[in-house]
Image (cartoon, rainbow, N blue to C red):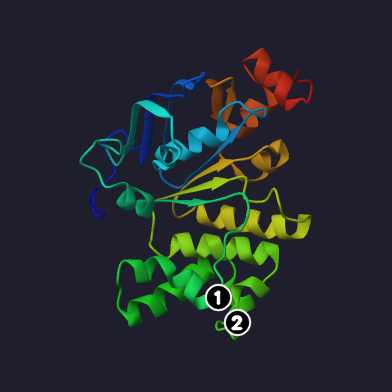
């Protein structure tokens, strides 16, 4: 998986083709196909248990950390199937970063949290210094912490911790960032700051957001994908799906009349 690979002729940074995830008991995802263009934010919504989190975890091979799951189909990043047995999953997760529902900062300084991934790949100190400042700036946190980088990350507010997690993911310069309900544990003010960060970042890279909040999807996403019972029911421009959904299930969900 080359860092310098170019975007395929179809224009997709990442493409999912007939993706299914099966456990011993059931089919969690069933034949999902969609692609992700450069400089975009796709929101994935649906009721609890529809497969949203499983879907986003397939996009950087996090599903294989859960015993008993089997993945079928393909996830192509810059034209290469990330599930090819010759592909290193650690490298996949560097190119396709992930931010989880609850902030996961480490008990170390703000600087060292942001530098964590860079130290794992043994970058030089001058590279780390520049990358930390850049990633903290891109995550919208730099102005709040630049005079206190040695402070413990655990002393930050929840919203600041989440933006630090975003900075840590950005420091290794992924082309895709996955966000699994990143504001569900945050208050409205902190949520707004994270949403502002997402709106800036989608001008630079591909974002894929799982959210239970249709209002959030309306505010920040370009496209909306609606999952139900493991199936991709509808996908399209966010405003179009919310205002003129083609499918009855989608309409029920976005209007809050979903059973």
Query: Where 72 falls versus 173 (above or below)?
Result: above
Q: How far is disc 1 from disc 2 in space, using C-alphas?
A: 6 Å
The residue sitting at 54% across, 61% down in the picture is 165
Image x and y of residue 182, in percent: 62, 50
Query: Where 163 falls versus 143 (above or below)?
Result: above
The answer to whether the residue labelled 1 contacts the one labelled 2, judged by CB atoms less than 8 Å apart, is yes
Pointer 1 residue: 110
Pointer 2 residue: 151
Looking at the image, the residue that sits furthest to the bottom is 147
Query: Where 48 falls versus 174 (above or below)?
Result: above
Q: Nearer the viewer, residue 33 or 238?
A: 33
In the image, taking residue 20 as reference, residue 7 lies left or right, namely left
In the image, taking residue 157 as reference, residue 201 lies left or right, namely left
Looking at the image, the residue that sits furthest to the left is 86
Image x and y of residue 248, in percent: 67, 13
- Element marked by disc 2: loop
Locate the C terminus by quadrant. top right
Image x and y of residue 114, in percent: 48, 70
């Amino acid at each position: 998986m080359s860092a310098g690979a170019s975007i395929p002729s179809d224009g997709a940074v990442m493409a999912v083709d007939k993706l299914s995830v099966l456990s011993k008991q059931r089919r969690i995802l069933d034949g999902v196909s969609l692609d992700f263009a450069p400089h975009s934010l796709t929101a994935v919504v649906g009721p609890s248990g529809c497969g949203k989190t499983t879907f986003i975890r397939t996009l950087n091979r996090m599903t294989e950390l859960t015993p008993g799951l089997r993945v079928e189909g393909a996830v192509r990043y810059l034209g290469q199937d990330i599930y090819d047995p010759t592909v290193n999953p650690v490298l996949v997760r560097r190119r396709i970063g992930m931010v989880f529902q609850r902030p996961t900062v480490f008990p170390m300084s703000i600087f060292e949290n942001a530098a964590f991934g860079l130290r794992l790949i043994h970058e030089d100190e001058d590279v780390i210094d520049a990358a930390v400042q850049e990633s903290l700036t891109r995550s919208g946190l730099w102005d709040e912490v630049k005079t206190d980088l040695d402070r413990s990350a655990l002393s930050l507010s929840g919203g600041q911790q989440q933006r630090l997690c975003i900075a840590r993911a950005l420091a290794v310069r992924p082309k895709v960032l996955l966000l699994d309900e990143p504001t569900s544990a945050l208050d409205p003010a902190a949520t707004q700051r994270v949403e502002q960060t997402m709106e800036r970042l989608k001008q630079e890279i591909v974002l894929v957001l799982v959210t239970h909040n249709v209002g959030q999807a309306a505010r920040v996403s370009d496209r909306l994908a609606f999952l139900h019972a493991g199936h991709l029911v509808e996908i399209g421009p966010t405003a179009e799906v919310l205002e003129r959904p083609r499918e009855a299930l989608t309409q029920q969900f976005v209007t809050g009349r979903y059973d």
